[in-house]
Image (cartoon, coloured by chain):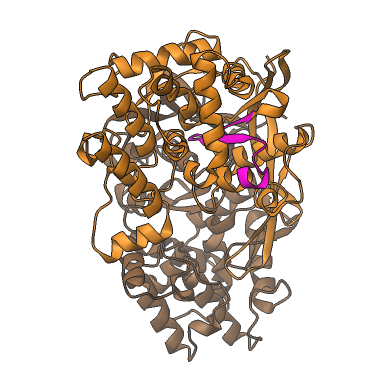
Chain colours: A orange, B brown
């Protein structure tokens, strides 16, 4: 037990101002846990980083058989509620004969600036379609229809969540020690950092010619890689870093500083958690691990926005830099 | 050297999800360092938590002699750019024969929702008056006039910043090991956590009948305590916790999770830094220290918003709680 290790530092005026510690694991579908920092056996909530796991039953059940890759990407997304995101989720619900009121994710102001400004100017409140998880919830509703289950699909004993838990535990290879309620009201099952990396390695190695679960995983990875803009949105780490890797990996952020990566060409899964929950640090750390594994160019603008990231103030004056800590990645 | 200690935890679904470590010091004007957690000798940037230190030369020089307590509170403020804040800073500048263009703090969107929405609806960009530091900068400009110095008052060798550094070093009792450029472009001098607590104890013990520096300090503390709404704004920790303490202490936040408190009735100064820079943790930690020292009621709504703070999601469902770590405060 060494505790978490220093991963990311903020320097200002030549002095270390702030720093972040965390745990990370790299899992090979062939060789198991091949690298780690900190304690990979630490139990964490994956939060939104495991949305592709939560989407497995949608496909495995056959409910999502004919879904477009756009909708599969949205099912795995923490989107920012731009008009493009909300319109597509709205249409999906309407094709199911459902509406915004059937969602159980709650409403919040979208992160997308254009849509937020439109709402403010129209004196309009955000709706549940704006919730960053609305695509995942549309997927839950579609599965719920197939299962002929009741409308409260986020309850822990609902058939949708029972199916999610079963898939989650099988793919992480661990019995989940518990669950929390997520920001979107869905249960979020706990696992270890290593378990989450193992699940990502399963996705990385999943073959389109395999069994139902493998085929489901392969389609979800393909959809995420095909639509980086739907998985998050303009300016966001998932979108920009996936674009920078040009289809070579799928990555996904989660609240409280979780980040995962799926690297099909190397059959690798990566998972990390910054213990303090800071997104700036989880973004820098996943970038460092992707650079280390030859997936991301350290000099790419999308990388440099997060790693060796020069900080500047309101007058454009350089004030500091976010760096990888020595000894990490 | 024990390193920083665990101060604040976020629990979800019965599991520890995230946690924050930090350093804290409590300094008595009479007995010196009386309590500490972590390493009080850690060098930090106080950021905005030291604005009352940066305002000392304004009063000591005589430049700010006739200033109202409102303007002194604004000089110590990280305000949120509401109409009330910007109007008062604008009038102050205009009485100096200056304008918004003389500021060197840069512009950013105000945190105040009403003013931000007004700007969005008017398709108007924020100006430098909206910068949370505009009151501090108005004070710098007033001092600069008195010193007959040039317009670039944020440069490190400018007479204003030389005066700030001298006051800062004398009151912290330490030669500053360096400086960084703050978000508002002003130099921010480094000191130790203990040095910052010592400075706050100087403010706590300063007498209106003392020398020029003590009188200046006493007036600034009085102004902060008299105007919690000007020091920050509605909904903010400084404002709400100062109101909850009903004039018994002045407190001030700084970026990257610094927080200080000035407790005149006990002649105590408190300073803390959360190493990862998370504001939710610095707010919880200062609340815990103020409760410990009998200044703040643990059951007050303003306290419970930050410490033993129940977290709920977009549908109002309880998801977790922010707590003090065992062994701290």
Q: Which image quadrant is residue A39 in?
A: top right
For the magenta stretch, what is the residue range?
A242-262
Residue B272 screen position, x and y as percent: 55, 43
Could you tell me which quadrant the N terminus of chain B lies in? Answer: top right
Residue positioned 69% across, 63% down in the render: A318
Q: Nearer the viewer, residue B6 or B197?
A: B6
In the rendered image of this protein, does residue B49 appear above or below residue A329?
below
Q: Which image quadrant is residue A241 in?
A: top right
Residue B272 visible within the image: no
Considering every residue shown, the one lying at the far top of the view is: A175
Q: Nearer the viewer, residue A173 or B108?
A: A173
Left or right of B40 on screen, residue B210 = left
In the rendered image of this protein, does residue B11 appear above or below residue A305?
above
Left or right of B242 on screen, residue B280 = right
Residue positioned 28% across, 34% down in the render: B299
Residue B107 screen position, x and y as percent: 51, 71
Residue positioned 58% across, 78% down in the render: B61
Residue B156 screen position, x and y as percent: 71, 71
Does the magenta portion include A288?
A: no
Residue A64 visible within the image: yes
Does the magenta portion include A255?
A: yes
């Amino acid at each position: 037990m060494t505790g978490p290790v220093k991963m990311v530092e903020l320097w200002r005026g030549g002095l270390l101002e702030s720093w972040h510690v965390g745990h990370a694991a790299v899992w090979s579908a062939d060789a198991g846990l091949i690298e780690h920092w900190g304690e990979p056996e630490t139990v964490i909530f994956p939060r939104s980083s495991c949305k592709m796991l939560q989407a497995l039953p949608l496909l495995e059940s056959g409910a999502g058989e004919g879904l477009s890759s756009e909708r599969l990407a949205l099912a795995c997304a923490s989107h920012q509620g731009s008009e493009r995101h909300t319109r597509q989720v709205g249409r999906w619900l309407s094709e199911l004969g459902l509406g915004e009121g059937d969602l159980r994710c709650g409403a919040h102001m979208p992160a997308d600036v254009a849509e937020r400004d439109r709402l403010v100017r129209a004196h309009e409140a955000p709706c549940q379609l704006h919730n960053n998880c609305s695509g995942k919830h549309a997927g839950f509703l579609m599965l719920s229809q197939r299962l002929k289950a009741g409308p409260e699909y986020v309850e822990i004993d609902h058939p949708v969540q029972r199916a999610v838990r079963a898939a989650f535990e099988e793919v992480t290879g661990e019995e989940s020690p518990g669950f929390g309620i997520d920001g979107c009201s869905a249960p979020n099952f706990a696992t270890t950092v290593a378990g989450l990396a193992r699940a990502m390695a399963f996705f990385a190695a999943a073959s389109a010619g395999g069994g139902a679960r493998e085929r489901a995983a392969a389609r979800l990875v393909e959809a995420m890689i095909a639509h980086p803009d739907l998985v998050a949105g303009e300016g966001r780490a998932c979108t920009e870093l996936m674009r920078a890797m040009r289809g070579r990996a799928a990555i996904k952020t989660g609240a409280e500083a979780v980040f995962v990566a799926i690297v099909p060409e190397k059959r690798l899964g990566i998972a990390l958690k910054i213990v303090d929950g800071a997104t700036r640090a989880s973004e820098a750390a996943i970038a460092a691990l992707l650079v280390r594994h030859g997936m991301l160019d350290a000099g790419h603008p999308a990388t440099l926005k997060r790693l060796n990231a020069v900080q500047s103030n309101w007058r454009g004056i350089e004030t500091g830099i976010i760096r990888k800590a020595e000894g990490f990645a």
